[in-house]
Image (tube, grey):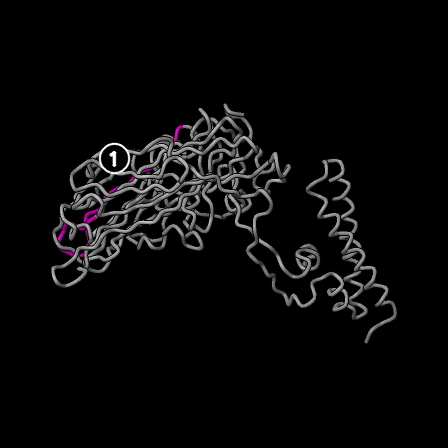
Amino acid sequence: MSLATDLSDGIGGLKFVATAPPGVGRLVRIPFYLETATNSFQAVTPGAAAGGASTTSPVISAISEAAGLQSDTATMKTPQISWATLRIVGFECSINTADVPVSVQPEVMFSDLKIGGGANLFVHEDFASSRIYLAGQDSFSGLRDYPLLKSPNVAEVQVSLFRQGAALANPAAAVADNAGGALFTCNLVCEILQDDNYGSHIPGPYARKGAMVRKGGSFI
Amino acid sequence: MTYYGADQQTAKVQQLAEKKAQLQAALPVVDDARAAAIEARLDRIDAALQKEIAHAKAIGNVAAIKAAMGIDGIGGLEFQAQAPAGVGRLVRLPFYPIAALTGNYEAVGTTVPVVEASGTAFGTAQNASIVLRTPQISWATLRIVGFETEQQCQTNLVTAAGAGIAPASTPNAKLVVSDLKIGGGANLFTHEDFADGQIYDADQPEFCGLRDYPILKSPNVAEVTVASLNIGVTAVGDIAHQFSCALLCEVLQDDNYGSHIPGPYARSGAMVRKGGSFI
């Protein structure tokens, strides 16, 4: 029993909590962009017709092109961040599907999140449902490690779509095609350790040295 | 069984607990020298309370001591209630269109923050980006601590001839945001290009960070670039997308209501940084 927590804090037996901003440079998001389009994954960019790749807009149109259960696989990458050293602390995505789809809503899947040529940061070696990492969840999903992200390294992740598909066109040319697709984005959740413009910051307690003690392992 | 001295001990602990609460309440508003003195006094009170707790266990007076400290019936649980942020904290300052909007965007002048965007037709260019801006706040000095979006979207459903609504609608539109800046300052977002506005959605359980928490003081204003994107529709208007953006601020000094104490995340101790060209 600690005097501070059990006997003197929160007089009256209640603690009042207000959700607060995380602090300077904490829990920032770095979007992934589609540098190479595939049949099933194409970017949607302001001021341009939908389709192709984009290094400026993170919004991706995904439709299963193949008649089957799984689309092709695309690689999404973060841009090189030359102005800061970041620590990766999470992965997050946001998905819009049709209000009334033609069949079951498609499922976006992710695998193999890695930095440069590093090891997979996901605990799943193969694809997992994006809903694990959906923004708006009460808690963040964990990763195997919280590595540094420093230019010229970038993060990349594999994405695929699960849907009882028919051969559809992407970018779609019919409402029925669109109704079977999704618009999605994904982001890295990071802490800025050092920013060339705004200086060095103190990371959140989850990303400090004391919270990342580990013993053994080939990546120590 | 209650031993001799239990009542006196209870009264003493009550006094100590009251003094501790008074000192803790004063701590955020005193200068550094006074704060150091208060912390030393709090340490001495803690030590005295610890001693009384040990003594209470020895004489069977624990329940009375807990009651005296205001934690009677806590039962080993801590209760938390979501609370208001406090005076002048986490206030929202809306962004407004800076001029009449064109293309598929619609707004009501420059005093209503809500913008509506229609979907673009298949194969045509997506909606271009627009700039939204906060008004000049001449009556207060603010510290920016976040950015927030709010959006609602509806896609029209296909009407099957004679059969009501058929199951087919397009995915809801996405709001993308970029280049949040104060006056002519550097981008406060970590993304140099567009990012999903959902990151900053008001419904998220936590706030997203920014690169800096700068001061916003008139005549400076904040501005942000936004765009509404969709997958393509058969006719313009098939997607209705309403959105608005707001700046999350702490009021540091208000001409009418005085100076406030910002939240702990916006105090100098929480914003320690070294180096950087903007320091």
Identify which residue, B266 or B62, lies in the foreground.
B266
Give residue A4's quadrant in the image: bottom right
The x, y position of residue A168, in whole percent, is: 13, 50
Looking at the magenta stretch, what is its main secondary structure? Answer: loop
In this rendering, position of residue A198 left or right of residue B30: left
Q: Amino acid at mark 1?
A: Gly
The x, y position of residue A70, in whole percent, is: 19, 53
Seen at 83% across and 59% down, the residue is: B12
Q: For the residue labelled by badge 1, is the local secondary structure a helix, a strand or a loop?
A: loop
Q: Which quadrant of the rendered structure holds the N terminus of chain B?
A: bottom right
Question: Label 1: how many residues lie within 10 Å, few (<14), some (14-19) or many (20+)?
Answer: few
The x, y position of residue B51, in whole percent, is: 79, 58
In this rendering, position of residue A64 left or right of residue A201: left
Q: Is residue B190 magenta?
A: no
Identify which residue, B4 or B209, lies in the foreground.
B209
**Residue, far bottom:** B1
As drawn, B130 above or below A103: above
Which residue carries the number 1 mark?
B103
Identify which residue, B98 or B189, lies in the foreground.
B98
Seen at 75% across and 50% down, the residue is: B22
- Asked if residue A80 can be seen in this view, the reply is no
Q: Is residue A70 magenta?
A: yes
Per the rendered image, the range of residues in magenta is A63-82
As drawn, B45 above or below B34: below
- Asked if residue B104 can be seen in this view, the reply is yes
**Residue, far right:** B4
Give residue A55's quadrant in the image: top left
